[in-house]
Amino acid sequence: MADITTTASANRARSASENPVKRFFRATEIDTRLLGMVGALLIIWIGFNIMSGGLFLTPRNLWNLSVQTASVAVMATGMVLVIVTRNIDLSVGSILGFVGMSMGVLQAELLPQLLGFNHPAIWVITLLCGLLLGAAIGALHGSIIAFLNVPSFIVTLGGLLVWRGATWFVTSGRTVAPMDATFRLMGGGTEGSIGAKASWIVGALACAAIVATIANSRKQRKRFGFPLRPMWAEYFLVAIGCALVLGAVGIVNSYPWPVAIARKFADANGIAWPDGGLFIPHGIAVPVLIAIVVGIVMTFISTRLRFGRYVFALGGNPEAAELAGIKTRWVTVKIFALMGILCAIAAAISTARLNAATNAQGELDELYTIAAAVIGGTSLAGGMGTIAGAMLGALVMQSLQSGMVLVGIDTPFQRIVVGMVLVVAVWLDTVYRARAK
Amino acid sequence: MTDTTRTPLVELKNISISFGGIHAVDNASVDLYPGEVVALLGHNGAGKSTLIKILSGAYKRDGGEILINGEPADINNPRDAKKYGIETIYQTLAVADNVDAAANLYLGRELRTPWGTLDDVAMEAKTREVMGRLNPNFQRFKEPVKALSGGQRQSVAIARAILFNARILIMDEPTAALGPQETAQVGELIKQLKKEGIGIFLISHDIHDVFDLADRVSVMKNGQVVGHARTEDVTKDEVLGMIILGKVPPKAIPGPGAMQTA
């Protein structure tokens, strides 16, 4: 008892001597690193908006940006776990290509012969097969790494070549199109968005979830008598979380369908075409929704489940993890299988979006995925990284690319910039970590 | 203390292991009774750590037998050892640097909620309780273990070992990283655990660290056991003679590694 009171007063004494900014960060427990990334993102956005004459920060461009980010963001969440355990996966782009091509052939050529064209079950069967295939490929890589002790760099470098070759082999290099109509919804577009009303519902649910999470964590901490955040900090976190969610929904809801598609829709449904045109908002795109769900699930796995705890312990000190009785090899296999599943989800998004499976699909995606994870604060030395950071990293990478296209920078120069940004970002991170110590 | 009619808690019989032709441990036998502290002494490279890693499941023995309470025990990995109530505090501490104290204490044996998720709050509560007993000044529960001092890391490692009601505790150079005050704390702790009937192996190359704490000493040299002795029967100098020369004093029981007196 005496202990608790002395520490409480010590804490009060400490916080009184701090400046207001420090006290604010301590009270809200906001990760300053993540905040730095948000700052960098805002600078990129505002910079491109000025350079493009106000084209970047429009609902249309931001909506497109969200859709373009989805596939790499999904894979980056898995790459975090891979890199946290001091491994690397260079094969994700090729797995995406191979799984995408397999799903393409399955839904466009094999299943229609069995079930008939546009059968409602085609997309489910295709997706399940894709997920299984991805998991199997990942588990194979993981097993070779864990049980045969081949370094992950080599195994996945081999995988990069093998699965790209296999992608060609499936159709001898031919592009497969078109995709199943329902499957295509996973790629976004006017059809593949959930509309204004559903978007607001999703937004409201997200706000409710934020309130519930914060309230629950406060209740738990109170139950065991742990130090609590001040009330104003709790309200502040709720307010900022809800504002971000509702703001994002507001933006995607102010991007209307293109006139031609809206007109076709009006004709088909017998709606009279008004003078000012018909304003039908897109709402949240399905791939973005998928990416958000993946992000939440992966965060849950990495922070709330035993598996996630093992992943981080393994990355921090492999020997200690082994001595603590963790089956480290199985953890490695599971990580790579999970990565394979995420590649399959990304493959579904990108083939659906393109409405075709090509043999170049996902080329260089491994590098963008790794870059996203690393920019997002995943340490290559292992043991550190967050899912949210990696997804934000993917958004930063995609913002740079889209922005440069919008401003009209040539393709070769785009790659030069992306490459340099990666190196600078990691350097800044090293400086930050050295100072944090 | 060591009356021979009782069954030893642990009996390592004729243990051998070699790495690439070098006999790191050669036909070594040691035993441990409940509530007893046995110091395992020897130079660096004498094979003490290797012998004990066989008991804790980190290495697989080439030959020999492990008996727990007189029954043959099948120990092939750290998980098996923990099932027999054997907990180890390694020289390197073996903590995961990047996670907090609670995560380290429960590593491999996490508490879970009915939904199968980690019960962090319960783990932290129990951690606060155990650490409060070991090291009342410890307050940095939220920080990764990396940020802690040597002594604090040591208390995390010890807390992990005693958290799960160990019956056999192995401490490999437990005070190597500690200052005088923390060393004294560890000494107090060992006496307390002894009272609870836990058997403790203390491993050290420095006799001064352990002589006063131990009931018996077993000395190793070049992978072989030089001999065993009760600490009340021998002097520090005689034990040093065992460590350095392999010379067994009259009241000690010689082992296979004893110097042959012609």
Image (cartoon, coloured by chain):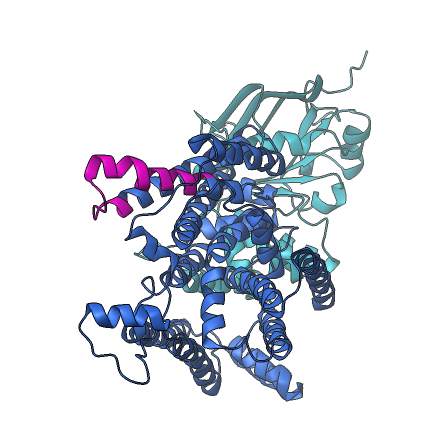
The quarter of the displayed image where residue A37 is located = bottom right
Chain letter, blue in picture: A
- Residue at left offset 76%, top offset 37%: B235
The residue lying toward the viewer, choosing from A118 and B212, is: A118
Return the x and y of residue B19 as percentages of the image width and height.
68, 22
Q: Nearer the viewer, residue A382 or A11?
A: A382
Is A115 magenta? The answer is yes
Residue A421 is at least partly visible in this image: yes
Q: Taking A180 as reference, is B125 above or below it?
A: below
Kindly give the residue lying farthest to the left in the view shown: A270
Residue A247 falls left or right of residue A394? left
Residue A217 on image: x %, y %: 40, 72
Q: Is residue A410 left or right of residue A2?
A: right
Kindly report the secondary structure that dominates the magenta region of the rendered protein: helix
Vertically, is A130 above or below A265?
above
Residue A270 figure quarter? bottom left
Q: Position of residue A172 (x, y in %)?
A: 46, 31
| Residue B106 in view of the camera | no
Q: Residue at x 20, y 40 (%)?
A: A116
The quadrant of the rendering that contains the C terminus of chain A is bottom right
Residue drawn at 47 percent across, 63 percent down:
B124
Marker count (numbered): 0
Q: Quadrant of residue A60?
A: bottom left
Q: Which residues are magenta?
A: A98-124
Any magenta on residue B100?
A: no
Q: Tell me the colour chain B is drawn in.
A: cyan
**Is residue B136 left or right of B81 when viewed as pictured?**
right
Q: Nearer the viewer, residue B55 or A436?
A: A436
